[in-house]
C-alpha cells in the first residue's frame, strides 16, 4: 500500500526500492516468518450464558477497521477482526474513524446471524474518537462533509435495523486510546490482541 501511494513514475515497479521502504519490508518479512508460531486457544461460546460483545474501532492514515471480542463470565476471546487499507484518495482521520465504525456495524448483522442461539446481553461499539461519538449520538448531523454525513446516516439506519431485527441492546461507547485494541490492527499487533482489555474482563 505504501509503495503504491509513493509511486513516482509509471514504471515505478522497475525502479530500485528506497532504503526506508527496504527497511520496512525486511522488518515485515521477519514478522511474517513468525506466523506459524501464532496459536489461537480453542473457545466455544455457550448458548446458556449471557454474552457481552465489544467491537473496538480505530483508524490511521493507512488503514481502518475493528476487532471484536466476546466475553462470558469474565473470560474473553477474539471473535473476529477486519482491517481495510485506507482509500488512495486522502480522507481526514475523523472520516476514516467513522468508516471503521460503519464497517463494525455491518459486521454485527453477520455476527448475530452466525451466533443466532447465543444470548447477547450487552453489545458495545467502541471508539477512541470523541468527535465521532458526538456525531453519532447527536440528533442532528454536525459535519458539513457530505461523505461523512452519509456514513452517519448509514450507522443510524443500521443501529435501528439491528435492534428491531435481533432485539439486542447496542451502545456506542468511548474507549481511551491506550485501552483500544483496535489501534493494533491499524498500526501493527502482537499476541496480546487475542484477549479483551482487562477493563472489560
Image (cartoon, rainbow, N blue to C red):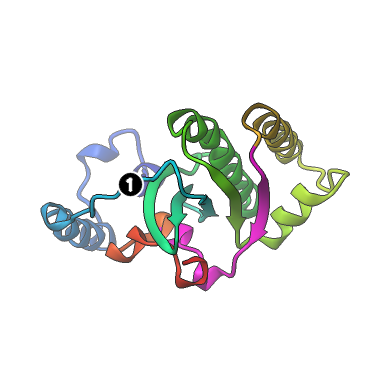
Q: Residue at x 51, y 33 (%)?
A: 112
| Image side of residue 130 versus residue 67, left or right | right
Q: Residue at x 75, y 48 (%)?
A: 136
* Residue 175 on the magenta segment: yes
Nearer to us in this view, 12 or 126: 126
Percent position of residue 190, x then y? 29, 64
**Mark 1 neighbour density, 10 Å: few (under 14) some (14–19) many (20 or more):** few
| Image side of residue 120 versus residue 152, left or right | left
Q: Secondary structure at mark 1?
A: helix
Nearer to us in this view, 120 or 134: 120
Nearer to us in this view, 106 or 147: 106
For residue 64, say whether it is visible. Answer: no
Q: Residue at x 43, y 30 (%)?
A: 114
Q: Residue at x 49, y 28 (%)?
A: 113
Question: From the image, which quarter does the N terminus lie in?
Answer: top left
* Residue 181 on the magenta segment: yes
Percent position of residue 116, x then y? 48, 31
Q: Quadrant of residue 184?
A: bottom left
Percent position of residue 164, x then y? 70, 29
Q: Which residue is tagged 1?
A: 3
For residue 142, say whether it is visible. Answer: yes
| Image side of residue 115 versus residue 1, left or right | right
The stretch of residues the image draws in magenta is 168-184
| Residue found farthest to the front | 48
- Give the vertical position of 75 relative to 114 (above or below): below
Amino acid at each position: 500500500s505504501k509503495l503504491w501511494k509513493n509511486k513516482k513514475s509509471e514504471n515505478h515497479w522497475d525502479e530500485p526500492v528506497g532504503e526506508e521502504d527496504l527497511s520496512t519490508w525486511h522488518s515485515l518479512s521477519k514478522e511474517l516468518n513468525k506466523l506459524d508460531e501464532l496459536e489461537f486457544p480453542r473457545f466455544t461460546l455457550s448458548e446458556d450464558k449471557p454474552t457481552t460483545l465489544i467491537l473496538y474501532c480505530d483508524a490511521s492514515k493507512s488503514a481502518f477497521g475493528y476487532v471484536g471480542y466476546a466475553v462470558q463470565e469474565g473470560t474473553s476471546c477474539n471473535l473476529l477482526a477486519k482491517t481495510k487499507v485506507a482509500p488512495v484518495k486522502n480522507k481526514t482521520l475523523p472520516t476514516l474513524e467513522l468508516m471503521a465504525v460503519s464497517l463494525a456495524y455491518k459486521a454485527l448483522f453477520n455476527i448475530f446471524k452466525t451466533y443466532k442461539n447465543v444470548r447477547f446481553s450487552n453489545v458495545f461499539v467502541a471508539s477512541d474518537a470523541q468527535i465521532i461519538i458526538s456525531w453519532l449520538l447527536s440528533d442532528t448531523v454536525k459535519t458539513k462533509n457530505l461523505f461523512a454525513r452519509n456514513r452517519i446516516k448509514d450507522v443510524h439506519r443500521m443501529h435501528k435495523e439491528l435492534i428491531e431485527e435481533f432485539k439486542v441492546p447496542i451502545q456506542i461507547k468511548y474507549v481511551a486510546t491506550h485501552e483500544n485494541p483496535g489501534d493494533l490492527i491499524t498500526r501493527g499487533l502482537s499476541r496480546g490482541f487475542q484477549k479483551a482489555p482487562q477493563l472489560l474482563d
